[in-house]
Image (cartoon, grey):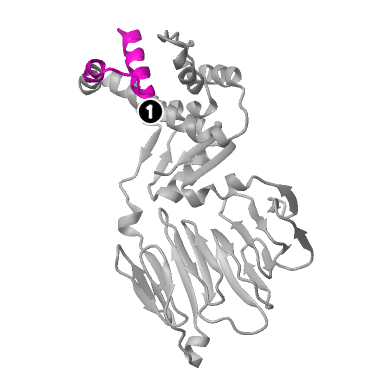
Amino acid sequence: MREHIDELIADKISGQISAEDDALLTKYIGTDESVRLQWEQSLAAVSLYKATQQGSNINEKAAWNKLVEKLGAEPPTVKLKTQKFRWLVAASILVPLLLVSLLWFSLSNSNMQFAQKKASKTDPIKVMLSDGTIYTIENDKGVTAGEIHFGAKSASRADQRKGTALANEVITLAIPKGKTYAIVLADGTSVKINSASVLKFPLVFSGKTREVELDGEAYLEVAKNAKPFIVKTPEMDVKVLGTKFNVNTYPGNDAQTSLIEGSVAISNNDHTKEFLIKPGQAAVKRANNLIAIENFSTDKVLSWLGGTYYFSNMPLREIVNITNRVTGEDLYITDSKIANYRFSGALEID
């Protein structure tokens, strides 16, 4: 019976299942709780396997042995009908399945719990003006501040207005968990702001520099201009003229500025030392407050723009922090034993 279920699931996932077998599997899934759970685990494993194809090479045997050790079980033997299903076996022993298996194992044993809170319902995007006035953006209802109309997912500019009050206006844009936002600043610089982040910027750039403040993560494409563009963060300052880069200063992680194009100068907040980095390099500020220059993968650093988050040898507690931030859900680990288990793989937000 169990081998037959394995074969039906393999046929279904590979698209080779007959109409008769498809109906039979659907019946099993609807009437047998263990089959339903096996089906959902198989879908999660294959989805995660596909998402990690851009990741680094993984030792499948070592990964499988580690899974067995963690779960305290003997490796099951699954007989598949043809050679065409070997890819499914390979998918089942990749490290991402460690995450899937432990998540299911933990949920079934009440080691993890979801809070009944939806960020999309309770936490709107907020726009705050210099005088303390706060506007909230909910659903499709937007707000207009000065020359900017803030829509549900992005902001657009109307014809620029003139006036001392507008020229001195500084806007604070707060993006909650579970949402991202796009905006074009007065100089033409485009900014994509990640969830749980705050961007503070002037309505009109004046003076000898263009300065914004960022707490969280954002990808910037800075418009070329004779005035230096400066991103001030809690951990470091980034100075550019015109370039493309990503800044990540989320709490609990090493602050990192990753350069995609052009050149930037990185400094500590006290400006005692400055570092120049080139495309493909990142300035990383460790817990010891020292800045190191490292290479990085552009695809992985910018994957959040497409809704995918890659992680390498990361503790489960940090992975949960990511899911909470980008989905708006609250997932808690109630069993501390699994919090420090480490995984490599990817999370697809959709």
Say which residue appears at 40% left-offset and 9% top-offset. Answer: 81
Residue 40 location (% of width, % of height) = 34, 27
Q: Is residue 12 magenta?
A: yes
Say which residue appears at 57% left-offset and 76% top-offset. Answer: 187
Judge by depth and name the residue closer to the eye, 214 or 3: 3
Decide if residue 299 is in sight here: yes
Image check: 200 left or right of 43? right
Quadrant of res 128:
bottom left
Which residue was labeled with disc 1?
A: 43
Quadrant of res 188:
bottom right
Disc 1 marks a residue whose amino acid type is: Leu
User: Looking at the image, which residue sits at the far right?
Assistant: 273
Say which residue appears at 33% left-offset and 21% top-offset. Answer: 12
Relative to 305, is 200 above or below? below
Q: Which residues are magenta?
A: 1-23
Relative to 166, is 338 above or below? above
Residue 315 location (% of width, % of height) = 56, 36
Image check: 269 left or right of 27? right
Residue 101 location (% of width, % of height) = 44, 25
Relative to 296, is 225 above or below? below
